[in-house]
Structure formats: structure tokens, C-alpha cells
Image (tube, rainbow, N blue to C red):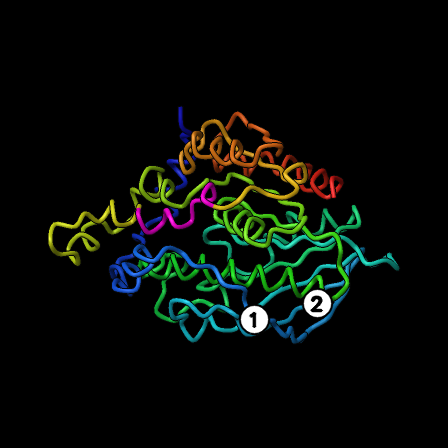
Amino acid sequence: MTSLLDRIYAKYSNRRLFFSDGWGHLDRLRELVREGNRHVVPRPIDVRWAKTSEKDDAFFRQGEFVSPYDGLPLPDESKRAFLEFVLPKNTSDIPPVCIHFAATGDEGFARRRNLFALPLVKSGIASLILENPYYGRRRPREQQKKMLRYFSDLVTMGSASVSEGLALVEWLKKGGYTKIGLCGVSMGGSIAAEVAALDASELAVVGCLTAHSASVVFTEGLLSRYLAWSVLEGQLKNGENARELVRKILDLTDLTRLPPLPRPEAAFLVAATGDAYVPRSSAAKLSFHWSGSTMKWLHTGHVGAFLFHRGQFLAALRNAFARL
């Protein structure tokens, strides 16, 4: 049985519909389906630091870099990526570091800083928090909060975040960091998982409430009720079906199409049995594909897991780094 809390939250947090202006770059989306999602190694990035501060047990550094993504066009506001580095204060060694990717609607750094980075600092683990394209300072002026205007914005957001994540992993390696992890909740977990699979090096990976493919989230899960289906359908011709096209495009994110992880024992998944956003079968499919990884099932829904079981997310992170 899916979570009542999930349904209540979805109703009041999605007062507008996703993709209210339609497909966006429809011809390019069709081209992606024909050619498949060809991943390329992103160019190196140059992080420029703008602000440094400290408090209690942590140093904070905020910076930016030019996104290395060169696929579907990014809006001008999203071409610069912003990040915050949270480092343990009382250490002379190079610490382990975890890159945190954003969940749907998670703008800025504060939520991930307070819920993940600051508790991890106490365990000697640094955090690198990346702000998604289309969110926060990277949000297009015409966009209303998290509600992406075009379906192609979703594809661009995910692809650009993966490209930026891969570039950050390489940037950390060049900086001498040897223990690197990736983490995210919901959409952020999917991005972390894809970066890990594409990088193919020994990384700690934690996916919380993570689907094996974005297609099930947007065509089967609760979020599918909040898409502007009539607009998408109205922009198609020749009998095409909007839901089927969404499925085909988003199946390019199917993690089971990518190789398993080289160090699955350092991968931890946390899923919810009553999740209305991520079907239970989808979370289980990713766990099966990552044979040797650890799965923790929570008896709650998507929202309940985030509100009441964040300790399980942090425990998974600490355990994942302990396996490196």
C-alpha cells in the first residue's frame, strides 16, 4: 500500500504541472531515442572559489565553474555551476569526500548541508554540494520554482548533472582525494548512481529512494499525475503517444543498461516499501543489478523516509565509506 503522506505532499507541492509549455527540443529528443544516450568524458573543470567561512567543526568554501555539459542547450542561467565544499576543521589529512546531488526541488545548499554534510563532518567526511541546473541561482527567470517548463529541460537537467558529477570526481582525484563517494535522495540518488556507473572507478555510492530508471517515476509513479499530458499530447503528430514517448526517452537513464559497479560492496541503497513515487519493483531491480550491494528497506513512504529516517541515510553513507 502506497503512502498517504506521499499523496498529500504531492497534492500540495505540485500546484502547477510539470512541462506546461510542452516538449521543448522535440527533434533533439527524438534523435536521442534513435541514437541512444552516448556518454562522453566531460572536459576538465576549473573551480573558482569566491567565499570562505568557518563554524564549529567545519570550513565552508563556495565556488563555481563553467558546466562541461555540451548536449541539449542549457539556459544561460544554468551554464555556471555553483558548489559548496564542507570540510572537517580539525584534520591534517586529506579527508574522504562525498558529492551530494539534489533531489527534485532542492535548491541551494542549506538542506543538504544541514542534513548530511554537517553530521558527516563529525565523522571526518567532507562534502561537496552541487546545485542542479534549473535550480536556485541556476534557475531560468521564466521558471516557476521547481516546475520545469519543457520536458527537454528534465533531460537536460539530468544529463548536465551527470556530466558535472563526472567532472567533479576527476577534479577531486587530481586534487589528491583518494576516497570519494556519491550520494543523493530520489532524483539525486539516480544521478549519483549514474555517475558511479559511468565513472567505473572504486567509489562509495549511496542511493536513497532511487529508481532504476526515471521512466517509471514519470509514467508509473505518483509524479505522473502532475505532468501536462494534454499539452504534450497536443504537440505530437502521426498518432504518437505522449506517455510512450516519455517512457522511451527516459529509459535512456535505465541504470541496468550500464555495467555493474566495480566495488558493489561499497554501494548502499535505501528504499521504502510504501513509496508512491518510486515503485518498489524499480528499487529492487537496481539492487539486483548491483549484485553485492546492500539494500535497506524502510516500512514507510517516500516522504516519510526523508522526514523520519534520515539517520538510515547517514548510516549508509558512513558504511559505504568504511568499505573503500
Q: Is residue 287 left or right of residue 238?
A: right
Residue 38 against residue 181 in the figure, above or below: below
Residue 173 vs residue 11, the one in the foreground:
173
2 or 1: mark nearer the eye: 1
Horizontal and vertical percent position of residue 65: 59, 73
Mark 1 element type: loop
Which quadrant holds residue 321?
A: top right
Magenta region: which residues? Answer: 248-257
CA distance for labels 2 and 1: 23 Å
Horizontal and vertical percent position of residue 77: 45, 73
- The amino acid marked with disc number 2 is Arg
Horizontal and vertical percent position of residue 47: 64, 73
Q: Main secondary structure of the magenta part?
A: helix
Residue 288 vs residue 218, the one in the foreground:
288
Residue at which label 1 appears: 43
Which residue is painted at 22% across and 49% down in the image? 242
**Badge 1 density bin: few <14, some 14–19, many ≥20, Cα 10 Å:** some
Does the magenta segment cover residue 254? yes
Asked if marks 2 and 1 touch (Cβ < 8 Å), the reply is no
Q: Quadrant of the C terminus?
A: top right
Q: Is residue 186 left or right of residue 182?
A: left
Residue at the far right in the pictured view: 92
Which quadrant holds residue 307?
A: top right
Which residue is painted at 26% across and 60% down in the image? 23
Does the magenta segment cover residue 243? no
Mark 2 element type: strand
- The amino acid marked with disc number 1 is Arg
Which quadrant holds residue 222?
A: top left
2 or 1: tag closer to the N-terminus: 1
* Label at residue 61: 2
Residue 115 against residue 21 in the figure, above or below: above
Which residue is painted at 44% across and 30% down in the image? 280
